[in-house]
Image (tube, grey):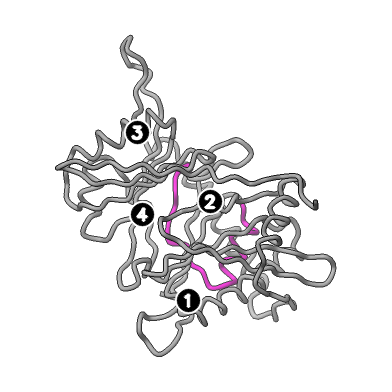
Amino acid sequence: METDLQIVSQVDEISIQDDRVSLCLLINRRQGVMRVIDFRSGPNPAKRGYIMEQVEAQGVSRVVTLVEREEVASWARIGFLKEGSIPAFYKRSDAHILGMLVGADLRADESGARPVALDYAARVNTSAVIAAYGAARAAAKAHEGAEPPAVRVQPARPADVERALASAARAGRLASHLEPFSRDVERQAFMATARGGFSLLVSVESQPCYANAFVELVQAPRTEKEARLTAAALIHVMQRLLEQQMVSAFAVTAVEDAELAACFIQAGFRRTGYLQGHLIVANERRDAFLWSRKLASPGGPGARDGEF
C-alpha cells in the first residue's frame, strides 16, 4: 500500500427548523468554521440566537454565510460583517459573504463564558494587508506577458487524490483536506505534472445547479519555479471549467502567502474579499483573501476573460 494516511472529512451538517427559522449549519471541525445556509429569508432576530447557541455547543470560532444582495442588510443587523462577494456564484446573481469571528466574553458571570463577536477593526492590521496584496500583485506582474511553462493537466483518479493528500501531509505541506464548502456538491480533480518532478493536485468542488467552482490546491508552491508551474496549471484548469460551462470560480488563500495569491492573479482571478480569521495555518487562525473569476455568462455564447 502506497499511503499510510487516511484523510477523513470533519464536516458535519446540522438542521434547525421551527416556525421562525430554517437553517442548515455546515460545521468544519478541522478549521473551526461554521457556514450558515438560510432557507427562510428575512430579518428574524431568532437566527442569531440559534447560531450563537451552536457556536458554543460546537466549539467553532468563525461563522460565515453567503446570501444574495437583498439579504445583506438583515444579516448585518444581527452582527455579521460583509467581507466580500463572489460574482455569479448563484449563476445569475452574486453571492455576498458575511462573517463573524467569535471569542469568549471574559466578563461572563459564574454560569460560564459566552461567545461574542470580536471587534473587526481592532484586530486587523490594515497596512500589513495592503502590503501583502501589493506583494502578490508584484509577484504576478513579474511574469506578466511571459509564456507559461509547459504543464500537463489531466483528470485525476481517486487513487491519485489519496496519494497527493498523503504525500503533502507527510511533507508538512498539506494546504487543504478538500472538505465540503457547500451542500449537494460534485468534486473533480486534476493532476498537473511537469519536467523536473513537479506534481500538483487541483481540486474543484461545484454545485451543478449554479455552475460555480471552488478551487483548492493540495499544496502551495515553495519556489519561484513551482509558483510559475502552479499558475500554468491553474490556467489549464480554468480552460477545462470553461469547456464544462462553469459560470464562476473562486478560491481562498492565506493573506501572507503572496506567491500562491500571485498564481491565482496570473490565472485571471481578482481579489473580491477579505475573510477575517478564516483559515487555520500552522495551528494559528489566519485572515484570508477571497479570489474570484467570472468565467462565462449563463446561457451566453462564450467565455469572458475573468475581468469583471
Residue at (38% x, 42% y) in the render: 63
Task: Give the SS element for disc 4.
Answer: strand
Q: How far apart are marks 3 and 1 (CA)?
A: 38 Å
Q: CB under 8 Å between callouts 4 and 1?
A: no
For label 2, count other residues whose C-alpha is less than 10 Å away and answer few (under 14), some (14-19) or many (20+).
some
Give how far across and how far down residue 144 sits, in percent.
63, 76
- x, y percentage for residue 99? 36, 46
Q: Which of the marked residues, 2 or 1, is nearer the chain's N terminus?
A: 2
Q: In this view, does 308 lie above or below 221?
A: below
Depth order, front residue of 305/34: 34
Q: What element carries label 3?
A: helix
Please report contact status of discs 3 and 2: CB closer than 8 Å, yes or no. no
- Residue corresponding to mark 2: 179
Q: Label 1 amino acid?
A: Gly
Image quadrant of residue 52? top left
Residue holding disc 4: 97
Lower position in the chain sequence, tag 3 or tag 2: 3
Secondary structure beneath dot 1 equals loop
Q: With respect to residue 36, does 308 lie above or below? A: below
x%, y% of residue 195?
Answer: 83, 72
Callout 3–callout 4 Cβ contact below 8 Å: no
* Highlighted magenta segment, given as a residue range: 257-277
Q: What element carries label 2?
A: loop
Q: Name the residue under label 3.
A: 54
Given residues 262 and 67, the one toward you in this image is 67
Three-letter amino acid code at disc 2?
Answer: Glu
Question: How many numbered discs, if any?
Answer: 4
> What is the crowding at mark 3: few (fewer than 14 residues within 10 Å), some, or many (at least 20)?
some
Q: Marks 3 and 2, Cα distance to the nearest angstrom?
A: 20 Å
Q: Nearer the viewer, mark 3 or mark 1?
A: 3
Amino acid type at circle 3 is Gln
